[in-house]
Amino acid sequence: MSKKKKSIFDFYKMKEAGEKVTWLTSYDYPTAQFAEAADLDMLLVGDSLGMCVYGYQSTVPVTMDQCIVHCEAVRRGAPNTFVVGDMPLGSYQASDAEAVHNAIRFLKEAGVDAIKLEGGVRITNRIRAIDEAGVVVIGHIGLTPQSSGQLGGHKAQGRTAETAKLVVDDALAVQEAGAKILLVEAVPPEVTRYIANTLTIPVYSIGAGPYCDGQLLIVSDLIGQFQAFTPKFVKKYCNVAEIITKAMSDYVADVRNGQFPDDDQYCYKMIAGEESKFLDAMKK
Ligand code: KIV
């Protein structure tokens, strides 16, 4: 029986029932298929694809067109999973109209279920405009990688009483503006717990501790594919970099030693009796 796709209402019921939502990033068709088979609740086609797929130094260069193409692939791979498109830097900052236009592109061109955008108090007009256009908005506060320059790098947020209050202000503003879910990144667990207990919308964590309604990880970290660095909060469940490198170096050795291909891999042999006819024909 195929998996039943969850809706935003299921996520509200899960918060109510104390059931945790499972969320991972995905950027391509095969990984989305694996996620659907693993019964994951949600997928995020994050602008982290800039680093995890394209090898950029940050998410800054990622464009709308790149995000749409990857969302389309993920949608095809996971038709029964709630898919979230991530609005890249430059796609929603300039005006409400541009934000709404780009949010709707995600739905029309890639068939996603929701969009995510970074920022708290300063981005509430955009959240309100996109929500009023009928698109499910997921807010993202705490460490917001697109503005890491202003944050002084990829640093945890809300570690003092004063800055924790600013994170809570952001959370309340995002909910008030119409976001249906909130993602909190790299914030102390005490602060996340306060936010999850205060907000009526589901609150999910990436590197913000266990006291909330669900967890997100970057799939490339979880499977040991992204090599540049691994954030402290990540749990690596396997090391595909090692597995794939070993498979490739075994192949290199086999080809060089004449062990690939061998008789088991020759699939298109000549039809019986045709080889001698072929060789005769070549002599003429
Ligand atoms: O792009 C992404 O994967 C994200 C996560 C870091 C939350 O926004």
Image: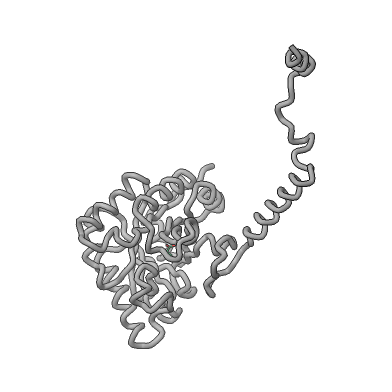
Judged left or right of residue 245, residue 263 is right
Percent coordinates x, y for residue 13 in the rendering: 40, 60
Judged left or right of residue 2, residue 247 is right
Judged left or right of residue 171, residue 204 is right
Q: Residue furthest top?
A: 284
State the residue at coordinates (41%, 59%): 47
Could you say which quadrant of the image residue 174 lies in? bottom left
Percent coordinates x, y for residue 163 in the rendering: 34, 84
Q: Residue furthest front?
A: 284
Instruction: Looking at the picture, tell me which residue is in the foreground, 224 or 216.
Output: 224
State the residue at coordinates (70%, 53%): 249
The answer to whether residue 257 is above or below residue 180 is: above
State the residue at coordinates (79%, 16%): 276
Figure quadrant, ligand 1: bottom left
Picture quarter with the C terminus: top right
Percent coordinates x, y for residue 100 in the rendering: 24, 55
- Colour approach in the figure: one colour
Q: How many marks?
A: 0
State the residue at coordinates (31%, 45%): 108
Picture quarter with the N terminus: top right
The answer to whether residue 212 is above or below residue 30 is: below
Instruction: Looking at the picture, tell me which residue is in the foreground, 233 or 177.
Output: 233
Percent coordinates x, y for residue 61 in the rendering: 38, 60
Instruction: Looking at the picture, tell me which residue is in the foreground, 57 or 168.
Output: 57
| Residue 24 appearing in the image | no
